[in-house]
Image (tube, rainbow, N blue to C red):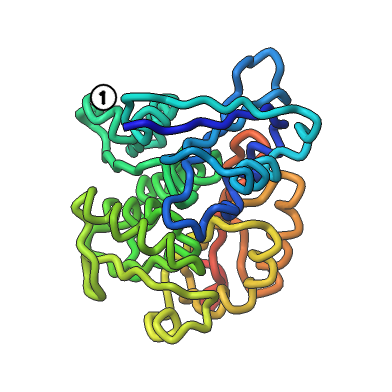
Amino acid sequence: MSSWKITLPCTKAEAEAVEREESPFAAFENPPVLMSSEPDETKPDEWRLDGYFETAPTPDDIALFRTLAPSAERIEPSIEQLADEDWVTMSQQGLEPIRAGRFFVHTPAHRDAIPADAIALEIDAGRAFGTGQHETTTGCLLAMDRLKEGAISFDNILDLGTGTGLLAFAALKLWPDAKVAASDIDPVSIDVSAENAAINGIPTGTGKGEVELIVAAGMEHPRLAARAPYDLIVANILAGPLIDLAPSVAAALAPGGRLILAGLLNTQAEAVTSAYRRQGLMGSFDIVRGDWTILTMRKRKALGWQ
């Protein structure tokens, strides 16, 4: 099967934006796979952006791809046809598996590399954010792993802004008797999460040991409201929306419940922490992954901190 690849140089900030923000191709019937990489570790701000297309990219496709790397506006993109290859598999070859605590997150290309002692989750690099490659996703996995190590159990869990479903699936693996909800504003993300649930043998539904997949713009969605209060909420979004959502997220969290917040740069951690402290939460521990901070917080119980 023939496919096409477009390549542009980009900055580290542009590469991170591609990872955390919705793709401009999200509404396409067959969106390209977007990949960012650091070709030379000695040049930490010189990154590369690749887009893998199933068919020859049109001038409009190329123009849209160029918007992802404004720093390369004066550079002509490299465009090449890739013949006789499985383009999805090839695009994933550069995605090395991630080991985060007891989790091993991998693409189909690394099914034969799963450690015997790991909880393995297979996530394709494709149409939704959250393959485990980004530091925020890895940090959330580590935060949940640390809560499990502390012998803390949860019965009702929400993955807010799920992307690929990865964090919801990981939560169910750690607490298999819990009820888990995974929501996202993007219907494509929920479709992708359903596909990934099937790949990983994750039961979907509304009961214990199942994940309910919900298209929702915020905590006010009837299904999310009906399932509250939650004793664990994981929200890997962005700093601005996290601050805006602080009142509704805190209200949906049970007294003594835990909250994992990610998608914020180290420089944004104080503002996000303050927004949730004003809602009655206290910091438990932080995990720093490169430029990113993952916050774990706890809601006050009726009588002090217990």
Q: Position of residue 238 (x, y in %)?
A: 64, 57
Residue 144: tell me if it is visible: yes
Q: Position of residue 155 (x, y in %)?
A: 31, 68
Corner quadrant of residue 16: top right
Residue 98: tell me if it is visible: no
Q: Which residue is mark 1?
A: 113
Corner quadrant of residue 86: top left
Depth order, front residue of 241/47: 47
Q: Amino acid at mark 1?
A: Ala
Q: What residue sits 25% from the left and 29% below the top? A: 114
Q: How many marks?
A: 1
Q: What residue sits 69% from the left and 66% below the top? A: 243
Q: Secondary structure at mark 1?
A: helix
232 lies left or right of 242: left
Check disc 1: other Cα within 10 Å, few if <14, some if 14-19, many if 20+: few
Q: Position of residue 162 (x, y in %)?
A: 45, 59
Q: From the viewer's perspective, is residue 256 above or below residue 223?
A: above
Depth order, front residue of 61/247: 61
Q: What residue sits 66% from the left and 29% below the top? A: 77
Depth order, front residue of 299/103: 103
Q: From the viewer's perspective, is residue 293 above or below residue 272?
A: above
Image quarter (top left, top right, bottom left or bottom right) of the N terminus: top left
Q: What residue sits 55% from the left and 69% below the top? A: 299
Q: Position of residue 110 (x, y in %)?
A: 29, 28
